Image (tube, rainbow, N blue to C red):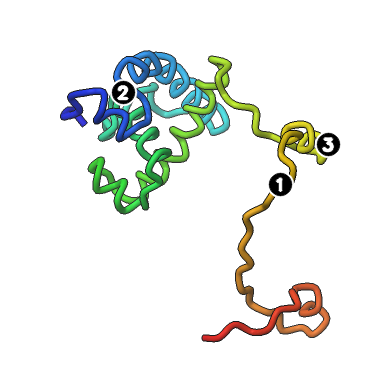
Amino acid sequence: MNTITDDRQMRALTVRDMAAFCALAEPFAAGCQQEADARFTDQRPRKRKTGGGRKGVLSSPQQKLLFVLYYLKKYPTFDVLAATFGLPRSKACEHAHRLARALERTLRTQGVLPARAIDLLAQLQRVFAEVPVPLLDATERPQHRPRAVVDRAADYSGKKKTAP
């Protein structure tokens, strides 16, 4: 992580250049703190002060930001992510999800989070009005059939069995 030397390498890892990365690091630190505060208010009272306990591998906000941007760009398996950043696999999973929420919170407060929630068909038609024929990419996956005959009919797709 300390070996990133130029903008080309930073863009290859995170989609951002060094200046944009550094500009996002400070607001991201605040977003991480807000995420941590929200996480600990839902639990019983703390036994230790904030910051007590063992220090993690991802100690600085810059390391955390690099971790989550790398994860969101490359989508490696948690085994690969853990090996890349020197973490246990379970912690890589926890950090990826927690830091993604913190990044989303940060981008929302900056007002740069894209609007992607489309709830109604009318909204979809307004967003994609210039597209003549929208195509959906979907793959049907085999399902385990229920044992009860009554429940089988609801899951039947009409296709023939797949070859083993």
**Disc ID at residue 83:** none
* Residue type at the position of mark 1: Pro
The one nearer the camera, 115 or 36, is: 115
Q: Does 122 sit above or below residue 153? A: above
Instruction: Answer few, some or many: residues within 10 Å of disc 3's Cα (few below 14, many 20 plus, some between 14 and 19).
Output: few
Horizontal side of 63 relative to 151 (left or right) equals: left
Secondary structure beneath disc 2? helix
Please tell me in which quadrant of the rendered image residue 121 appears. Answer: top right
* Residue type at the position of mark 2: Gln
Horizontal side of 140 relative to 102 (left or right) equals: right
Residue visible at 68% across and 83% down in the picture: 160
Secondary structure beneath disc 3? helix
Q: Is the C-beta separation of discs 3 and 2 under 8 Å?
A: no
The answer to which of marks 3 and 2 sits earlier in the sequence is: 2
Quarter of the image with the N terminus is: top left
Q: Position of residue 104 (x, y in %)?
A: 52, 28
Q: Does 135 sit above or below residue 106? A: below
Instruction: Answer few, some or many: residues within 10 Å of disc 1's Cα (few below 14, many 20 plus, some between 14 and 19).
Output: few
Q: Position of residue 148 (x, y in %)?
A: 77, 83
The answer to which of marks 2 and 1 sits earlier in the sequence is: 2
The number of discs equals: 3
* Residue type at the position of mark 3: Ala
**Disc ID at residue 62:** 2
Q: Position of residue 50 (x, y in %)?
A: 39, 22
What is the CA distance from the residue labelled 3 to the residue labelled 2? 41 Å
What is the CA distance from the residue labelled 3 to the residue labelled 1? 14 Å
**Disc ID at residue 122:** 3
**Mark 3 or 2, which is nearer the eye?**
3
Q: Position of residue 79 (x, y in %)?
A: 31, 53
The residue tagged 1 is 134
